[in-house]
Amino acid sequence: MHDRLHELETDVRDLPVPPAATIRARGNSRRRRRRVTVATAAVAVATATAGITLAWPQQQRQLPTATAPADRPATPGLTCDLTLPSDPAQVRVRVLDGGASPTRMATTAAQLEARRFTVLDGTTGPRPATPATVVYGPAAIGTAAVLRAVVYGDATMRFDPTRPAGDKTIDLILGPAFTRLATTTEMNENLATAGEPTAPPECANR
C-alpha cells in the first residue's frame, strides 16, 4: 500500500499544470458561452440613448400585478392601461423612503435617472414587508411591470385602483433590506420570465 501511494504521489506531481493565463482563458470562454445562452433566451431590450425596445414573450409565469384576491369584482368604469413604454422616460418614478438609508435612496434615484427613467421628488412611505414595494394605478400597469423588472430581488406589487385616471406615476418604496437595482442582463431575464403584464381583478377591461 505504501508503495502504491508513493507511485500516485509521483504521478500527481508529474502532471502538467497549465499556466494561469490558460486557466483564466478557459474560464472566460465558459462564461462567454453562458452569457450567449442567457442573451438568446432573454428578451431583447435595447437601453441605448435612443430608448428601449421591449419584446414580451409569452410565458406561463406572470409578474404579480396586484395584491388583491383574484375573485374581487371589477370596479365599474375602471379602465386599465397595460401599454408597455417605448422609452424609459415614459416611466415616471417617485422614490419613497420606507426605511432605506439616505445613501441608498440617493444612489437608487441617481441610477434610475442614469437609465433615463423620469424620477420625481419623493418623501416617505410605509415600510415595505419586502425589500421594495411598487405602487401603481390603472394607468401605469405596463410601466409598473417594467419598473418591477429593474428592481433586484423580492418586491411587492401593489395596485391602487383609487389613483386618478391618467396618473402614470409609480411609487417605488425602498425598505431597509433593499440593496440595489437589477443589472441590464438581470432586467432582460426578469422581463423574459414575466411575460406580458395582466390586468388586476378590479379592471373592467380585464
Image (cartoon, helix red, strand yellow):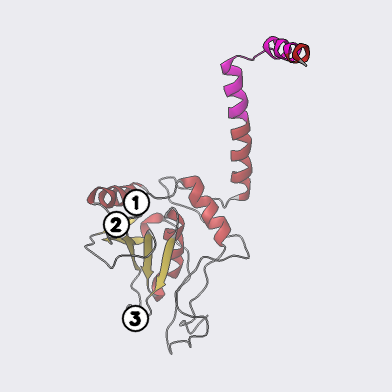
Question: Looking at the image, is mark 2 or mark 3 nearer the viewer?
Answer: 3
Alpha-carbon distance for marks 2 and 3?
A: 22 Å
Q: Disc 1 marks which amino acid?
A: Leu
Q: Which mark is residue 112?
A: 1
Quarter of the N terminus within the rendering: top right
Q: Which mark is residue 162?
A: 3
Taking 167 as reference, is 34 left or right?
right
Q: Within the image, what quadrant is residue 120 found in? A: bottom left
Of the two numbered discs 2 and 3 on the same chain, state the one appearing first in sequence: 2
Residue 189 position in % (x across, y down): 54, 52
Q: Can residue 146 be seen here?
A: yes
Q: Disc 3 marks which amino acid?
A: Thr
Residue 83 position in % (x across, y down): 47, 68
Alpha-carbon distance for marks 3 and 1?
A: 26 Å
Badge 2: residue crowd in 10 Å (few <14, some 14–19, many ≥20)? some
Q: Report the magenta residues as a range.
A: 6-29
